[in-house]
Amino acid sequence: MHAVVFGNVTAIIQRMYSRRSLYHTRTKDLKDFIRVHGLPKALEQRMMECFQTTWSVNNGIDVSELLKDFPDELRADIAMHLNKELLQLSLFESASRGCLRSLSLIIKTSFCAPGEYLIRQGDALQAIYFVCSGSMEVLKDNTVLAILGRGDLIGSDFLTKEQVIKTNANVKALTYCDLQYISLNGRRLLWLYPEYAQKFITEIQHDLTYNLREGHTAEHKAA
């Protein structure tokens, strides 16, 4: 019994040291990169802060890398669990289970530190974003148009024939923010489910907390 307990404790300690060693290795690599490329101090500080914060959240585990060798069926089940908060939005209520499983596999995560811009006015919009935690503000001409928080959805009713969707405002983090997003390339997947794709086009116009499409002038949805 004592041998089993001792063995378990030893294994835990070894994993702790291994993880700590990986952290120091990554930190050194990052500092070497900054030095070799002569990055300015402000940019160095932003990079280090982002690295340290994301490490504290995921302990250095790259989920995509970890799951890449698992069968698609199992990866889809895991992705459904990891992305359940986003997929429970009313926007996805009418999607089939097959559609949801496919969507779950293309949902990505992102992070913003306080003061960082997620989107700048005039940028080509790359995705629709779901705020998992934190607080952000929508700005235009130094005027705050909206404050965003957990559960808010921002982006555009992007399933259109437009080639480029320009953004009508800046989106800036007020606190540390975790986000999930579906890239514009994900729209191709929706067309594999044409009946739901049509519903998505209709519903997203009502479900967006703030529509960033240039030319869209409707007020943002009340929280």
Image (tube, helix red, strand yellow):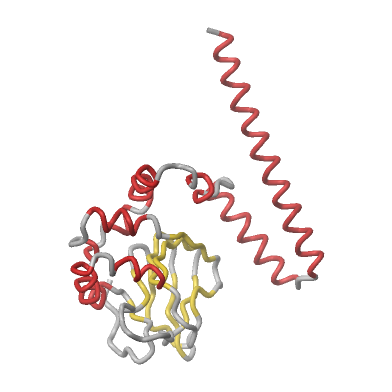
- Residue at (60, 15) in percent of width and height: 6
Where is residue 109? Give x, y as percent.
46, 59
**Front position in the image: 186 or 142:** 186
Where is residue 206? Give x, y as percent.
23, 76
In the depicted structure, whether residue 218 falls above or below residue 8: below
In the depicted structure, whether residue 170 falls above or below residue 79: below
**Front position in the image: 180 or 135:** 180
In the depicted structure, whether residue 140 falls above or below residue 109: below
Left-right relation of 69 to 24:
left
| Residue 167 quadrant | bottom left
- Residue at (76, 71) in percent of width and height: 39
Where is residue 151? Give x, y as percent.
33, 63
Q: Residue lying farthest front?
A: 192
Quadrant placement of the C terminus = bottom left
Q: Residue lying farthest top?
A: 1
| Residue 78 quadrant | top left
Where is residue 1? Give x, y as percent.
53, 7
**Front position in the image: 141 or 130:** 130
- Residue at (28, 85) in percent of width and height: 219
Left-right relation of 94 to 128:
left
- Residue at (44, 60) in percent of width and height: 108
